[in-house]
Image: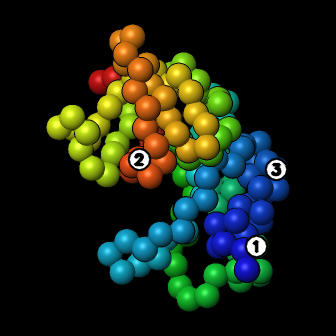
Amino acid sequence: MAKVTDTVAALALPVVEEAGCSLWDVEYVKEAGTWFLRVYIDKEGGVSIDDCEAVSRPLSDLLDQQDPIEGSYTFEVSSAGADRALKKPEHFEKFQGEEIEVRLYRPREGRKEFIGRLKGYENGTVTLDMDGEEAVFTKQETALVRLYLRV
């Protein structure tokens, strides 16, 4: 049986593309006792509220019709965001050389957060260039990888 996120992604892809956007990610998570189905979209120049609405309405109808998820959930469509999480190989490929943040489950050298330029990605392993010093993080130790925004 296919994962909920894979099933929803297959349903969402044509709807998202019809709205002139690209599908970034699908997330199905339980938070504070409530299930959330989140569809993250992207678009050159940024995603507007109108883009989210153009995806949300037809996709909501399609999900009601196909009913791929048992039980109730809260459905959301939003932008992947400027500090978007990088999860898929194509995400890492797109942002090669960009500044990213890696968060670990357990501290390494007394800290859990590392910031540097994305130097490489292979089979879940992330390589950062931190001011000329290379750091390698395995998939097993990595809790989150996302674009880093300087404030």
Label 3 is placed on what type of residue?
Glu
Look at the numbered disc 3 and give the secondary structure of its residue: helix
Foreground: 137 or 13? 137
Answer left or right for 84 relative to 96: left
Q: What's the image's color scheme?
A: rainbow
> What is the CA distance from the residue labelled 1 to the residue labelled 3?
14 Å
> What is the CA distance from the residue labelled 1 to the residue labelled 2?
35 Å
Residue 1 in the image, given as x and y percentages of width and height: 73, 80
Residue plotted at (37% across, 16% down)? 133
- The tag earlier along the polypeptide, 1 or 2, is 1
**How many marks on residues?**
3
Residue 25 in the image, given as x and y percentages of width and height: 61, 52
Residue 22 in the image, given as x and y percentages of width and height: 72, 44
Residue plotted at (77% across, 56% down)? 13
- The tag earlier along the polypeptide, 1 or 3, is 3
Q: Is residue 15 above or below residue 98?
A: below
Q: Which residue is mark 3?
A: 18
Question: Taking the image as drawn, is residue 50 in sight?
Answer: no
Closer mark to the observer between disc 1 and disc 2: 2
Question: Callout 3: few (<14), some (14-19), or many (20+) C-alpha neighbours within 10 Å?
Answer: few
Foreground: 119 or 11? 119
Q: Which residue is mark 2?
A: 142
Look at the numbered disc 2 and give the secondary structure of its residue: strand
Answer left or right for 134 relative to 96: left
Closer mark to the observer between disc 3 and disc 2: 2
Q: Which residue is mark 1?
A: 62
Label 1 is placed on what type of residue?
Leu
Asked if disc 3 and disc 2 are in contact, CB closer than 8 Å, the reply is no
